[in-house]
Image: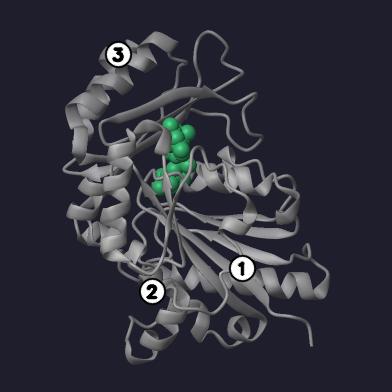
Amino acid sequence: MTAPIPVTVITGFLGSGKTTLLGRLLSHSAMAGTAVIINEYGEVALDHWLVESGGEELITLGNGCVCCSLRGDLVSRFRRLLINAGSGQGPAFRRIVIETTGLADPAPIVHTLMQDPLLSERCVMDGIVTLVDAVHAAATLDAHPAAATQVAMADRILITKADLVAPAALAEVRCRVQAVNPSIAALPVEYGRVEPDAILHCGPGTGGVAALGRWLPGQTFAPLGESKGLPDRHRRAGIETLLLEPEAPVSRAALERFMDLLCETWGDRLLRCKGILAVTDDPTRPAVVHAVRHQRHPVGRLPAWPVDLQDSRLVCIGERLQEDWLRGLWASCAGG
Ligand SMILES: Nc1nc2c(ncn2[C@@H]2O[C@H](COP(=O)(O)OP(=O)(O)OP(=O)(O)O)[C@@H](O)[C@H]2O)c(=O)[nH]1
C-alpha cells in the first residue's frame, strides 16, 4: 500500500496573494514533487504564466470556478493526474496543491474530492489554507459571504500584504478574522514569504478539513454531471468578467494612467484586475499589472513572453462593470 497523497487547498478572496504565495513556495526544495492545479475565474487564465513552477506539474482550469461550474473538470483532471502517474505516462508527484479562484467556497471542493472513489482512496485532504488581504479584509468580509466561508473553514490563515497596513490596522484584521474562526491563529505575511510548514501538515485536528468531514455527510450539492452544464453561481450573484486584448504595445506612462483611472473610477466595484501587456519601451518583456479594488499594485515585468502567450491580455472581475467604458478608457489612455 502506498501512502495517500496529501492535498492542500489554497484559497482566499480575489487578489489576496494566492499565486504570489504559491510561486514562492514552489521554489522551496521541500515542495519538490508537487502537482499544482490552478483555477482562475477570468475569461482568460493568466496565473500559470506568473508562477515559476520549477518543472512541477502545473494544470490550469480557467473560465469558471471549481466550487461550482468546474467541479466535474476538477475531478477529471485529478483522476488523469493519478492515472498518468500510476502508469508512468505522467510525472510522479508527492503532493497536490489546488489554488482556487478568489470566489470559491471550499466546501463543495472538498466534498467533490472526498466523494470520488479513486480520489478518496488515493488522496487525503491535508488542509485548507486561507489568505486574507490585510488591505481589504473588512470590505470583503462585509460584502462577500464566500470570503467569510473561506476563513471559517480554514486550517491555516495567512494575513497577506501585512507590509501595506499599519500595525493597528493589522491587529484589527486579526480580530476580525478571529471572530470568524477563533480556533486558528492568523499569521501575517509579506509577499508570500513563509516556510512550507506554514501551509503543510495540517493533519486531523479541529480545523477546517476535520470540521468539513463532520459536516459534509449531511449536505447536498448539485450532482456533478457534465461540468459545462453546471451553473456558475458567482455569475448568477452578479460577478462579471471583462477581457481586453489590446493589439498594439502601450507606453508605460499610458498603462500607469489607465490603471490609476480604472482603480479611481471603479474602486470597490472592481474586485480584481490583472493583465500581461506589451509595452513600447521593450515589447519583448511584457508588463504585469495587478489591482484589487482601489489598490493598484506596482507594475512588474516578465523577462520574456511565455511560449504559449504572445498577445496582450487584461482581465477585470467585478460588479456592474461597463465594457464600453473600459474600452473607451483604454482607447483614451493608449491612444488606440
Ligand atoms: N505589497 C504586497 N503585495 C502583495 C503581497 N502579496 C501579493 N501581493 C500583490 O498582490 C497582487 C495580487 O497577488 P496574486 O498573488 O496575483 O493574488 P491572487 O490571490 O492569486 O489573485 P487571484 O487569483 O486573481 O484571486 C500582486 O500584485 C502581488 O504582487 C504582499 O504581501 N504585499
Tell me which label, 3 or 1, sits earlier in the chain.
1
Q: Is residue 1 above or below residue 230?
A: below
Color style of the picture: one colour
User: Mark 2 highlights which residue?
Assistant: 107
User: Mark 1 highlights which residue?
Assistant: 201
The CA distance from mark 2 to mark 1 is 19 Å
In this view of the protein, can residue 312 be seen by the observer?
yes
Mark 3 lies on a secondary structure that is: helix
Left or right: 323 in relation to 72: left
Res. 263 image quadrant: top left
Front of the two marks 2 and 1: 1
Taking depth in this image into account, of 109 and 172 the one nearest to the observer is 172
Q: Position of residue 164 (x, y in %)?
A: 37, 32
Taking depth in this image into account, of 128 and 255 the one nearest to the observer is 128
User: Mark 3 highlights which residue?
Assistant: 333
Front of the two marks 2 and 3: 2
Q: If the picture is divided into quarters, which one holds ligand 1?
A: top left
Taking depth in this image into account, of 241 and 147 the one nearest to the observer is 147
In this view of the protein, can residue 224 be seen by the observer?
no
Quick one: label 1, few (<14), some, or many (20+) residues within 10 Å? some
Mark 1 lies on a secondary structure that is: loop
Q: Position of residue 262 (x, y in %)?
A: 25, 26
Left or right: 49 in relation to 143: right
Q: Residue furthest toward the bottom?
A: 218
Image quarter (top left, top right, bottom left or bottom right) of the N terminus: bottom right
Tell me which label, 2 or 1, sits earlier in the chain.
2
Q: Residue at x 59, y 26 (%)?
A: 302
User: Callout 1, which amino acid?
Assistant: His
The CA distance from mark 2 to mark 3 is 42 Å
Tell me which label, 2 or 3, sits earlier in the chain.
2
Quick one: label 3, few (<14), some, or many (20+) residues within 10 Å? some
User: Callout 2, which amino acid?
Assistant: Ala
